[in-house]
């Protein structure tokens, strides 16, 4: 299949995922409205930033987005935004969040690397910028130990990934290729069968035996373990220093240009949240779970929450070199034409915030705005 056709099919498949059902459709049609608690009250005498009535923030309802969960639940966003209201939308899928960003339904979002790459390249570099990091890790290959006892046993089995061309799908296809196995990326058929399954459905599919394992993020991985699964591989072991980007912070380029003070406020809140998370892991875990419960109506049980939390690292560093590698993996899998990612990062404001906090600055691995 010609490379340009593969790339078109990939983009078409990603776009189709935007139609996946969300937690609870809000008026904007993209995500559910997140609920703020009493800690998010506006301080007396606070002023609006840039005269903005609100800043609209998007994130996913999972633990790899805990920076945003905690910053919402603890009121860090609202504190930094003053009298400008922090409003929220919760998403299930990256394509939906990119669509919301492009339409102006959100201004800033927490999102995985593959949707960020796709959103940037589809718009010829005009729609978004990655302005910070949030989390690393939290992805595992979990299998049915009755069917799979070693890595070589994965051959010939059915392995679930969340979406065609999403971050975990690309990672699994790349890993399978490194084993010398051939898999058609579009159909998922080959020496291993890749079954694209929504994370909410994967535990039931695993329990019923319709899949033999899954390469998935947290907390889905720990939900499978709770159903009797075994962690066969932690993706972090495949990366230098066991670090790879799983969650970025993105912004609409127009919003970044027009309201840099608001962007700075959100990044201050993010840095503050990560600092608090790393200093207070148990309290932070409870805070993230409380926000998950507020957003979805259901908290995670301890046997899922505890192991999931331990596998995620929270960092302001966007780990830019690993994003470039993940893009190379998508190209290698035949899901993407070689993208030009030069300029996808603008870390100017983040580094300003980090300097003011006495923290080390971060770099864009040659992919930053000049």
Image: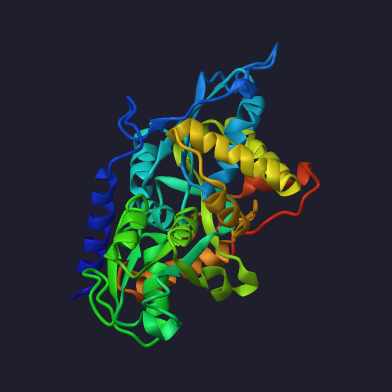
Q: Position of residue 218 (x, y in %)?
A: 49, 55
Q: Position of residue 354 (x, y in %)?
A: 73, 46
Q: Vertically, is 275 above or below 42? A: below
Quarter holding residue 5: bottom left
Task: Name the outermost residue toward the right.
Answer: 358
Q: Vertically, is 234 above or below 279? A: below
| Residue 129 or residue 247, whichever sits in front | 247
Q: Residue at point 46% right, 42% down?
A: 61
337 on left or right of 291: left
| Residue 240 or residue 33, whichever sits in front | 33
Quarter holding residue 72: top right
| Residue 227 or residue 238, whichever sits in front | 227
- Whether residue 340 is visible, yes or no, is no
Task: Name the outermost residue toward the top.
Answer: 45
Task: Name the outermost residue toward the bottom.
Answer: 180
Q: Residue at point 29% right, 81% down?
A: 156
4 on left or right of 248: left
Q: Quadrant of the N terminus?
A: bottom left
Q: Position of residue 304 (x, y in %)?
A: 52, 52
Q: Residue at point 26% right, 65% down?
A: 210
| Residue 229 or residue 243, whichever sits in front | 229
Q: Position of residue 192 (x, y in %)?
A: 30, 78
Tell me which colouring the rendered structure shows.
rainbow
368 on left or right of 45: left
Q: Residue at point 37% right, 59% down?
A: 166
Q: Vertically, is 124 above or below 210? A: above
Q: Quadrant of the C terminus?
A: bottom right
92 on left or right of 6: right
- Total count of labels: 0
- Whether residue 84 is visible, yes or no, is yes
């Amino acid at each position: 299949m010609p490379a340009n056709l593969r790339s078109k099919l990939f983009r078409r498949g990603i776009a189709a995922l935007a139609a996946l059902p969300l937690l609870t459709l809000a008026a904007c049609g993209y995500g559910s409205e997140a609920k703020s608690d009493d800690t998010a009250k506006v301080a007396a005498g606070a002023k609006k930033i840039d005269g903005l009535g609100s800043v609209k923030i998007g994130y996913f309802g999972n633990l790899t987005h805990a920076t945003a969960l905690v910053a919402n639940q603890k009121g860090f966003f609202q504190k930094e935004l003053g009298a400008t209201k922090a409003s929220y939308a919760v998403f299930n899928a990256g394509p939906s969040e990119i669509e919301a960003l492009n339409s102006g339904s959100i201004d800033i979002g927490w999102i995985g690397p593959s949707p960020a790459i796709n959103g940037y390249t589809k718009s010829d570099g005009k729609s978004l910028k990655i302005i910070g990091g949030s989390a690393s890790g939290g992805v595992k290959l979990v299998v049915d130990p009755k069917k799979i006892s070693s890595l070589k046993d994965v051959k010939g089995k059915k392995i679930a990934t969340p979406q065609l061309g999403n971050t975990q799908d690309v990672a699994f296809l790349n890993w399978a290729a490194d084993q010398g196995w051939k898999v058609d990326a579009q159909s998922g058929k080959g020496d291993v069968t890749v079954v694209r399954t929504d994370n909410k459905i994967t535990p039931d599919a695993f329990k019923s035996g319709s899949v033999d394992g899954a390469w998935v993020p947290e907390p889905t991985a720990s939900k499978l373990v709770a159903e009797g699964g075994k962690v066969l591989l932690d993706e972090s072991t495949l990366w230098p220093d066991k670090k790879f980007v799983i969650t970025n912070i993105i912004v609409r380029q127009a919003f970044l240009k027009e309201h840099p003070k608001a962007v700075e406020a959100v990044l201050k809140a993010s840095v503050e949240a990560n600092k608090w998370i790393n200093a207070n892991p148990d309290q932070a875990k409870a805070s993230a779970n409380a926000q998950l419960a507020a957003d979805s109506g259901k908290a995670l049980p301890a046997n899922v929450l505890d192991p999931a939390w331990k596998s995620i690292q929270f960092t302001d560093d966007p780990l830019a070199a690993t994003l470039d590698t993940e893009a190379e993996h998508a190209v290698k899998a035949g899901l993407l034409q070689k993208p030009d990612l030069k300029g996808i990062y603008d870390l100017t404001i983040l580094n300003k915030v980090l300097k003011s906090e006495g923290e080390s600055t971060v770099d864009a691995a040659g992919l930053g705005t000049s």
